[in-house]
Amino acid sequence: MSVGRFISFEGIDGSGKSTQARLAAAHLERKGVDVVLTREPGGSPGAEEIRRLLVEGDPERWSAETEILLFTAARRDHLEKTILPALARGAVVITDRFADSTRVYQGAARGDLRQLVDQLHSAVIGRDPDLTFVIDMKPEDALRRGLARKSGEDRFEDMGLEFQIKLREGFLRLVGDAPDRCWLVDGARDAAVVAEEIASRLDAFL
């Protein structure tokens, strides 16, 4: 594969997207594909430092505008240090979240800030994934699952069910806005069944 491919997994907290990203990477690795599995916020040393500022602490720690700036800074470092070098060598990059999360979390669910998100993305990032899997699940079920992890990174889960409902609505709109890039997946099924559907789509895409 001479040209790298960039694939993202999106969805509300607790939807299973992190598990599916790992399973997708393992599927491709078994086929001999050079895969880089990464995440946001994070994915590079500098971005991981910013991650702790974003996912830990009080829900009211930052305004939505401040969050947008922090996420964009982390994403730029992630892009420079991890994503672009991997794509340049022809690898498949699989990321657990990318810019769509900022569009939904800060751009829509926390206020009407989508224009600001898009302006910063265009000026600083300038790249979207080639394929995005949006893992969908009822907010009530996803929230229970997310809080049960007790990961210590529960800042967004702690914003409550109403926030998770807004997030789901935002991700569903995203699929409607970018149907050529986004693939909606029912995450309420057994993880192995979900992974099989994703693997089939990946194989066809690559």
Image (cartoon, rainbow, N blue to C red):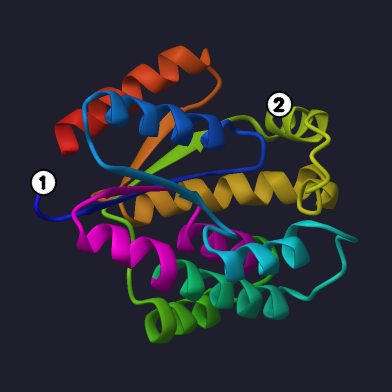
Task: Assess disc 2: are there few (<14), some (14-19) or many (≥20) residues with their C-alpha within 10 Å of its C-alpha.
Answer: few
Gap in Å between the C-alphas at discs 2 and 1? 39 Å
Q: Position of residue 35 (x, y in %)?
A: 32, 42
Task: Assess disc 1: are there few (<14), some (14-19) or many (≥20) residues with their C-alpha within 10 Å of its C-alpha.
Answer: few
Q: Is residue 96 visible?
A: no
Report the magenta residues as a range.
Answer: 80-108
> Which residue sits at x=37%, y=34%?
25
Residue 111 in which image quadrant: bottom right
**Is the stretch drawn in magenta largely helix, strand or loop?**
helix
**Looking at numbered disc 1 in the image, what kind of residue is underneath it?**
Met
In this view, the residue in front, 44 or 140, is: 44
Residue 150 falls left or right of residue 111: right
Label 2 with label 1: CB-CB less than 8 Å: no
In this view, the residue in front, 111 or 157, is: 157
Count of numbered labels shown in the rendering: 2
User: Is 184 located above or below residue 159 in the figure?
Assistant: above
Reading the image, the residue beneath label 1 is 1
Reading the image, the residue beneath label 2 is 141
Q: Position of residue 54 (x, y in %)?
A: 73, 64
> Which residue sits at x=55%, y=56%?
40
> Which residue sits at x=35%, y=17%?
196
Residue 119 in which image quadrant: bottom left
Residue 118 in which image quadrant: bottom left
Q: Position of residue 128 (x, y in %)?
A: 34, 63
Q: Secondary structure at mark 2?
A: helix
Q: Nearer the viewer, mark 2 or mark 1?
A: 1
**Looking at numbered disc 2 in the image, what kind of residue is underneath it?**
Asp
Residue 126 falls left or right of residue 57: left
Residue 150 falls left or right of residue 14: right
Q: Secondary structure at mark 1?
A: loop
